[in-house]
Image (cartoon, helix red, strand yellow):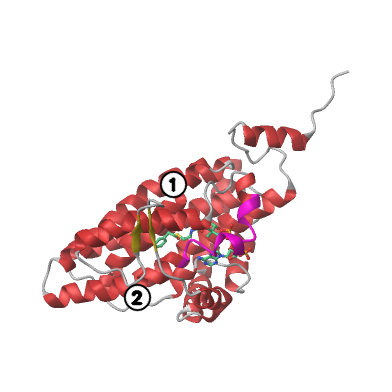
Amino acid sequence: MMQTPDPQLLFDLKVAEEQRIEPKDWMPEPYRRTLIRQISQHAHSEIVGMLPEGNWITRAPSLRRKAVLLAKVQDEAGHGLYLYSAAETLGVSREQMIADLHSGKAKYSSIFNYPTLSWADMGAIGWLVDGAAIMNQVPLCRTSYGPYARAMVRICKEESFHQRQGYEIMMTLAKGSQEQKAMAQDALNRWWWPVLMMFGPKDDESPNTAQSMQWKIKRFSNDELRQKFVDATVPQAEYLDLTIPDPDLKWNEARGHYDFGAINWEEFWEVVKGNGPCNRQRLEARQKAHAEGEWVREAAMAYAKKRVMSYEL
Ligand code: FAQ
């Protein structure tokens, strides 16, 4: 008699052999929960991440800049939607995820709780925030869960355009008047440390990394990605002739990497707990948009129902 294979063994084998886990495959419950947590937080980050840049669409310095920024912010909405759809394949509803964001239960990236004070911040966000996002997300194109990995392929392509548009703004400012260069430097000063925090807590304080790496959800640890980002970004800052605000930043010949100063982890956890400079403002903006969009959702549902009924006739 044929024996049914142990589902856990089959799952482990697939992960070991670099096959993707698909929605209808058996998976351990903690694997499913970890993916729902990470993918939904990632989706929320994209949607909340539209707010700091949305703040500058009406004030972009030219029609070209406005069109590009508008396209970037729209891309972020699209990323949120692919990611919510990927999370839905794991059995959680969109309504539940949105409710968790609005109640403050679900997290989103700490970086979007900082204010955008000048036009140069649009450059710094594209260059640094999207740069950090790419460093973290390119390995996610090989993550073990199929729908998440496939969503990441397109997202990463769009993120590279976002990074370039940010760097191009920084280049224009850094090579412009003294005032423009000072704006670029000020933006770098304010965004540098919060961007390093995006990669999450240090490895020895990251409760999820070891298991997520074993499941091949994560391919690199938080500290590994942070180091790669610093190594890639220092020469970009040098090219701009801007100074990274870290007196301890120094090339370490023996390690073949840059050493960098201590991150303020107290600030990070305060922001994660909801006490950052813009946490309240961000959640209020999302709640307001959701309430004001209710008639649109109702109208869309009524229209969809009408179409189904006309097919049935
Ligand atoms: N902010 O054990 P770990 C973008 C939480 S890019 C807030 O290390 P894990 C593009 C973490 O959730 C930004 N919370 O956790 C864009 C956990 O709490 P929990 C989004 C953070 O999951 C650009 C606890 O700390 N990217 O949106 C943060 O193994 C420009 C312990 O941490 C992604 O989400 C943080 N920075 O590693 C949009 C990428 N870091 O959930 C607009 C996918 C950690 O147990 C404009 N996510 N926490 O209650 C990941 O790669 C991972 O989830 C990490 C965290 C690396 C973020």
User: Residue 76, relative to residue 56: is it above or below?
Assistant: above
Q: Is residue 234 magenta?
A: no
Residue 102, numbered label: none
Q: As rendered, which of 134 and 228 lies closer to the eye?
A: 228
Q: Residue at x 48, y 43 (%)?
A: 141
Amino acid under disc 2: Arg
Q: Position of residue 2 (x, y in %)?
A: 84, 20
Answer with left or right where residue 106 lies relative to residue 293.
Answer: right
- Asked whether residue 239 is in view, the answer is yes
Q: CA distance from mark 2 to mark 1?
A: 26 Å
Q: As rendered, which of 150 and 191 lies closer to the eye?
A: 191
> Considering the image in quadrants, where does the N terminus appear?
top right
Q: Residue at x 20, y 59 (%)?
A: 239
User: Label 1: which residue?
Assistant: 138
Residue 190, numbered label: 2
Quick one: which residue is furthest to the right in this view? 1
